[in-house]
Image (cartoon, rainbow, N blue to C red):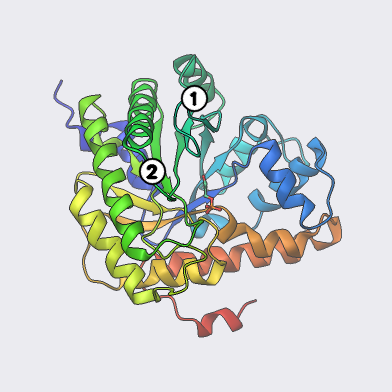
């Protein structure tokens, strides 16, 4: 085989997912999770409302300028726009790569109270093959690490790292670029020091497992959480500190052969998640593209503006494109807070 792995088809998709000034929209909420989002705006969690909401997001004019890919949920991958166009086709027409969440959720981990391990490996190869046929080009799997008293345990860190690596290997063998997402939760009163320690441990375990299971770093995207103070920690680290510590940990743990790092927003406010990303990209030249793969960080204002009403679709789309543009600027270190008030 003469093809070097950085020139493979999957490596090209991975590079396109983190192309300069663009990032990923995570719209892969499970039926339960989207139900919680809908509840906050008083909208019923019906299949048609879920379809209409995603249709609003995906058909927003100009969204492809800042969004390289969208992560879908199984149901969404099979749904269609109001004019009958399947969502993967609609996204492709916007220059956006369709992706798919393939894990089946974080479940209580046996013998590890308060901790979870992510499931979904059984039958995954066959599901990947079907998803490729439906138009997906990349996948996502989210592992959850909780910080608390005496946790995370080594059992939890290694079980999740192993599952992430098994998932990533199965994806690469079946034509999908794996987004490898180890999320260290920001819930709790822990300090940023503790978050840094746990994030570094987790990422080392993840890359060790990926190597052991032969996963090619050129053909994946890492989706980590930021190194940040616990949500209820009394002393909150500022934007510059979060950016510096996050990049320091990533430099210690992530091979430069990985084309890009696309952060989750994890419950940070939309403006703060943009400011953190921008500050990281102002730290000088980095070994990988550093961009976003936000769910709430991109969708929260658009969800509110939509409120379930057809009459609000156009204004909600404007709000979404604005947030996407702000994050696109942050992905190249060109965001300025005063651009927020100049919203369309
Ligand atoms: P948040 O940005 O809302 O954390 O969602 C990203 C995601 O895909 C979580 O798995």
Relative to 175, does residue 279 appear above or below in the rendering?
below
Q: Nearer the viewer, residue 232 or 119?
A: 232
The x, y position of residue 163, in whole percent, is 38, 27
Q: Which mark is residue 44?
A: none
Residue at the image position 24 percent from the left and 43 percent from the top = 204
Res 64 visible: yes
Q: Nearer the viewer, residue 222 or 150?
A: 150
Q: Which of label 2 and label 1 is nearer to you? A: 2
Q: Specify whether 212 is left or right of 185.
A: left
Res 55 visible: no
SS class, disc 1? helix
Relative to 38, does residue 2 appear above or below in the rendering?
above
The x, y position of residue 218, in whole percent, is 25, 38
Q: Quadrant of the N terminus?
A: top left
Residue at the image position 65 percent from the left and 61 percent from the top = 300
Q: Residue beneath label 1, please? A: 132
Question: Callout 2 environment at 10 Å: few (<14), some (14 to 19), or many (20+)?
Answer: some
Query: Residue 310's image quarter?
Result: bottom right
Relative to 158, does residue 325 appear above or below in the rendering?
below
Q: Which mark is residue 152?
A: 2
For marks 2 and 1, give the CA distance.
35 Å
Residue at the image position 23 percent from the left and 62 percent from the top = 248
First-in-chain label (2 vs 1): 1
């Amino acid at each position: 085989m003469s093809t070097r792995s950085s020139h493979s088809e999957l490596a090209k998709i991975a590079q396109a997912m983190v192309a300069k000034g663009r990032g990923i929209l995570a719209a892969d909420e499970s039926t339960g999770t989207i139900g919680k989002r809908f509840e906050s705006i008083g909208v019923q969690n019906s299949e048609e409302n879920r379809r209409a909401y995603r249709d609003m997001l995906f058909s927003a004019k100009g969204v492809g300028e800042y969004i390289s890919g969208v992560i879908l949920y199984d149901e969404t991958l099979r749904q269609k726009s109001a004019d009958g166009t399947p969502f993967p086709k609609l996204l492709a027409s916007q220059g956006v790569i369709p992706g798919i969440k393939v894990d089946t959720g974080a479940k209580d981990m046996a013998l590890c109270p308060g901790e979870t391990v992510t499931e979904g490996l059984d039958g995954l190869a066959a599901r990947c093959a079907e998803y490729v046929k439906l138009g997906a080009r990349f996948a996502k799997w989210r592992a959850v690490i909780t910080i608390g008293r005496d946790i995370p345990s080594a059992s939890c860190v290694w079980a999740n790292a192993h599952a992430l690596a098994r998932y990533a290997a199965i994806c690469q063998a079946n034509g999908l670029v794996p987004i490898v997402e180890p999320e260290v939760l920001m819930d709790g009163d822990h300090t940023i020091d503790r978050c840094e320690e746990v994030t570094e441990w987790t990422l080392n375990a993840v890359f060790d497992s990926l190597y052991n299971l032969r996963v090619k770093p050129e053909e994946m995207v890492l989706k980590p959480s930021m190194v940040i103070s616990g949500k209820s920690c009394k002393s909150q680290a500022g934007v510059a500190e979060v950016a510096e510590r996050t990049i320091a940990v990533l430099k210690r743990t992530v091979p430069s052969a990985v084309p890009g790092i696309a952060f989750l927003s994890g419950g940070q406010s939309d403006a703060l998640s943009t400011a953190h990303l921008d500050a990281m990209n102002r730290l000088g030249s980095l070994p990988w593209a550093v961009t976003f793969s936000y769910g709430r960080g991109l969708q929260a204002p658009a969800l509110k503006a939509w409120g379930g009403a057809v009459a609000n679709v156009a204004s909600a789309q404007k709000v979404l494109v604005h947030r996407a543009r702000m994050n696109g600027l942050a992905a190249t270190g060109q965001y300025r807070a005063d651009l927020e008030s100049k919203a369309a």
